[in-house]
């Protein structure tokens, strides 16, 4: 007879304890333990096929072969995955509700014609999925829909269908009969993910999981979930904007520096081939103050960002500092540098900063564009829309060199800009290979003299 016992699990890392603890010994989080009832039973066999007994092998005797991959219809998804979906891999895609995770997966699997696919939905009915497929304008005869939340039933249908790709949407809705706790709990998520991992490795069938995220933006459930899977992809973006970014957080079969960019349209997600054009305003011929163009790098792809700033006299006595898409502490640092090193009195003025297109920029190379936009708005003098700015601002007012400057300048030249302002000696040795006008500055004072004299 099965025995039921109470166990406390850390909601952050999955650490197990027989009693409640104030602080988790595993991850150091406070008040993260939750009580769950688990069943200790001898019956642990799920229909996963026969496990083979492995023997140790010398490292020198192991043959290195290229991992067989399934090429996905979306080139952006292939790039982030590292060249396609690896056979026998377990991939986790996380994102906010309504951001487009299910749409991304559904429009990709419906475009695969030569693979049998099982789509397991624990959140939507078959009718809802059919309506979404009709909206996407895609019909597939080799995609099977299963609306089920019990893990045992899912493996039963896997044996019947014998799919070549399995999609589970979402892992938090799946529950195993071996554990007497609610679906979405730490023990259920960990057990179901481990069972699906064993199935993927033993059968060679790739499994894609959809995961929820918590209020902090991390994958919901125990942290061990991210350790179990082979690849973790984050689908992010502001729902007020049309653009979405697919980012690789962990990838055992490729680089984690790749991103894919999509645009949400009426018929699903459209790939954005040139992200620079989507982040720049169309009215590039019209000169307006408070706007400067910078270059940032997301992953390995450089693209242009339009930095917008508004500086005005504080109407209510206390100056405001409002930032969208940029680090507020870094803006405060730049304003302090302008106040101390360049002698500009901005302490009694409101400063509003925005990265156009809803993009969140953490690259310090955008600092020079921020300075140019702020001072352009302060003087109410426009900066040429044909000039681009690349450089990091230091505390002493110096313009510091940035990485991969040749890729950034090449992107500026490709988009037809007339000039680019970069840190002094950053392009040493390769400056002559560019036809674009390159202006080198070493301090903020030199930048301001170039712009407004």
Image (cartoon, rainbow, N blue to C red):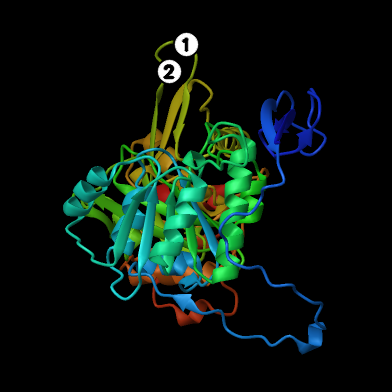
Q: Which residue is located at x 36 percent, y 64 percent?
A: 117
- The residue tagged 2 is 314
In the shown orientation, is residue 210 left or right of residue 53? left
In the foreground, 444 or 317: 317
In the rendered structure, are the residues bearing label 1 and label 2 in contact, judged by CB atoms less than 8 Å apart?
yes
Callout 2 environment at 10 Å: few (<14), some (14 to 19), or many (20+)? some
Q: Residue 377 is drawn in which quadrant?
A: top left
Regarding residue 374, the answer to whether it shows in the image is yes
Residue 444, x across and y down, in percent: 56, 48
Residue placed farthest to the top in the image?
A: 316
Residue 334, x across and y down, in percent: 57, 38
Q: Residue 95 is drawn in which quadrant?
A: top left
Q: Which residue is located at x 43 percent, y 72 percent?
A: 410
Q: In this view, does 12 lie above or below 207?
A: above
In the shown orientation, is residue 283 left or right of residue 8? left
In the foreground, 422 or 164: 164
In the foreground, 441 or 307: 307
Q: Which mark is residue 317?
A: 1
In the shown orientation, is residue 337 left or right of residue 436? right
């Amino acid at each position: 007879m099965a025995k039921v016992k109470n166990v406390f699990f850390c909601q952050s890392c999955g650490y197990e304890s027989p009693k409640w603890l104030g602080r988790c010994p595993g991850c150091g989080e406070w008040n993260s333990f939750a009580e769950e009832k688990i069943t200790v039973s001898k019956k642990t066999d799920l229909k996963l096929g026969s496990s083979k007994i492995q023997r140790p092998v010398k490292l020198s005797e192991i043959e290195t072969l290229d991992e067989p991959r399934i090429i996905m219809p979306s080139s952006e998804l292939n790039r982030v995955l590292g060249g396609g979906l690896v056979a026998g891999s377990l991939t986790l895609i996380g994102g906010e509700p309504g951001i487009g995770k299910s749409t991304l997966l559904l429009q990709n699997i419906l475009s695969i014609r030569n693979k049998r696919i099982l789509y397991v939905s624990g959140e939507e009915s078959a009718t809802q999925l059919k309506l979404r497929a009709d909206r996407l304008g895609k019909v597939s005869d080799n995609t099977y829909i299963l609306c089920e939340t019990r893990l045992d039933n899912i493996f039963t249908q896997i044996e019947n269908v014998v799919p070549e790709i399995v999609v589970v949407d979402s892992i938090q809705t799946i529950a195993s009969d071996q554990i007497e706790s609610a679906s979405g709990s730490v023990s259920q998520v960990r057990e179901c993910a481990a069972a699906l991992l064993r199935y993927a490795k033993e059968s060679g069938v790739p499994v894609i999981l959809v995961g929820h995220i918590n209020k902090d933006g991390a994958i919901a459930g125990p942290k061990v979930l991210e350790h179990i899977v082979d690849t973790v992809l984050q689908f992010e973006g502001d729902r007020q904007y049309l653009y979405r970014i697919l980012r690789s957080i962990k990838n055992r079969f490729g680089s984690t520096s790749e991103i894919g960019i999509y645009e949400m349209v009426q018929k699903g997600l459209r790939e954005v081939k040139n992200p620079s054009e989507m982040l720049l305003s169309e009215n590039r011929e019209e000169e307006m103050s408070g706007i400067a163009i910078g270059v940032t790098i997301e992953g390995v792809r450089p693209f242009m960002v339009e930095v917008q700033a508004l500086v005005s006299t504080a109407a209510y006595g206390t100056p405001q500092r409002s930032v969208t898409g940029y680090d507020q502490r870094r803006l405060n640092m730049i304003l302090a540098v302008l106040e101390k090193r360049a002698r500009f009195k901005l302490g009694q003025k409101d400063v509003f900063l925005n990265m156009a297109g809803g993009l969140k920029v953490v690259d310090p190379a955008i600092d020079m564009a921020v300075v140019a936009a702020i001072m352009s708005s302060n003087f109410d003098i426009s900066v040429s829309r044909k000039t681009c700015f690349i450089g990091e601002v230091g505390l002493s007012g110096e313009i510091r060199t940035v990485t991969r400057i040749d890729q950034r300048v090449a992107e500026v030249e490709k988009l037809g800009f007339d000039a680019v302002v970069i840190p002094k000696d950053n392009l040493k040795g390769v400056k002559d290979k560019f036809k674009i006008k390159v202006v080198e500055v070493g301090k903020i004072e030199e930048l301001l003299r170039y712009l407004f004299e």
